[in-house]
Amino acid sequence: MVGGLLLAFGRALIGGYAATLLFILAGGSWGPLPWMYLRAVQWLQSLFPPSYPRSAEADKATWTQLIHKPSWTRLVRSHPEKPALFAFIRDEEREVEGKPSDSSSDLHDTWDATAALVGAGMSAIVQDDFSAAFTPAPSYCESLNGFSLHPDWSPVQNALFAIGLVVRLFIFFPIRLALVATSFIWLFIWAGYAACIPIHPRLRTWIAVKYSRIFCAGTGVVAEYTRQECRPEGSGFAVSAHLTPNDAHILTADIPIATGHSYLVTGQRHTGIIGLMERMAARIIPTLWLDRASANERRSFAENVLEAAKQPTPVLFFPEGYCSNNTQLLQFRRAIFVRDVDIHPIAIRHKFD
């Protein structure tokens, strides 16, 4: 009895994996089912409390300060009708921190005031430009993607969470793992083929698109592509926001195979299995990889990528330089904006976060 159930379960998993793979290779999809699944998950999430009480210690642990900023280093407007006039130190705030209310002696200490204000400015710059885009935003909602129960949940909520955990671990996880492994095998086989036999550009595009779609299916990506008539074509830079290391896969999965060309993918050179995947991808599609530790390579990369932007294949470029956390954009590197080349902007955002 148990053996028969396990056999049937295994066949169901293989069937789901095989159907997904065949859909991708045939140019089809599961249609609206992935979106229906996401909406069902959102509905289940709505059955749980939207927020939980958080202590001040928890909030401080989430948003740590890189540089300690005393409150008395903050500028305050000293005249309500003159917004350009500020006072450097507030006596009442110094009293809270145990400093004397008469701050005239400290104001004469130029080094003390300057060091405190410079430190506060450095902290503001680092936190505004970098920390906010790299630090996960504090979550006041327990996600169903976790692995443990919350003490405030009811028995019904505990049961729903347990069912979801079983579905994720024993149905979705093995299918997605098999799809990711298949994408690696797919790329390895075609890279070996390309090393021996020249491949037509249209076949290269087909290989790259199918690899990207299989990989995205394995990582659970459910993407919606809008304004596809504005898809980058021809020379220039396809400039995109950078939210995950898999953004290149997501964008490549939307390329029409009939175009006969993919993106020229740029990125940081890695070692290990990621480096192996980069080397295999370089045999299928045009790539430019950068070793950030080498100053000479950074200079040559800037020249090579600008030269590549003049070719008929658009260069996929992430000018932020790093992955951000879906809350804001980092300042773009300006190297690609100094030459007379076309810029094709691409916006990526997470809808279900």
Image (tube, rainbow, N blue to C red):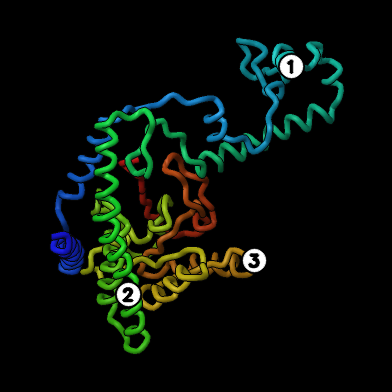
Rendered image: mark on residue 279: none
Q: Earlier in the sequence, mark 1 or mark 2?
A: 1
Residue on which disc 3 sits: 295
Pinpoint residue 312: horizontal percent, then vertical percent: 35, 69
Which quadrant: the C terminus? top left
- Residue type beneath disc 2: Ile
Residue 339 visible in the shown view? yes
- For the residues carrying marks 2 and 3, which lies nearer the camera in this image? 2
Query: In terms of depth relative to the viewer, which is nearer, 97 or 293?
Result: 97
Residue 104 sits above or below residue 194 on the image: above
- In the figure, residue 279 lies in which quadrant? bottom left
Residue at 18 percent across and 61 percent down: it is 6
Pinpoint residue 315: horizontal percent, then vertical percent: 41, 64
Residue at 41 percent across and 75 percent down: it is 282
Residue on which disc 2 sits: 185
Residue on which disc 1 sits: 94
Q: Earlier in the sequence, mark 1 or mark 3?
A: 1
The Cα atoms of the two marked residues, 1 and 2, are separated by 64 Å
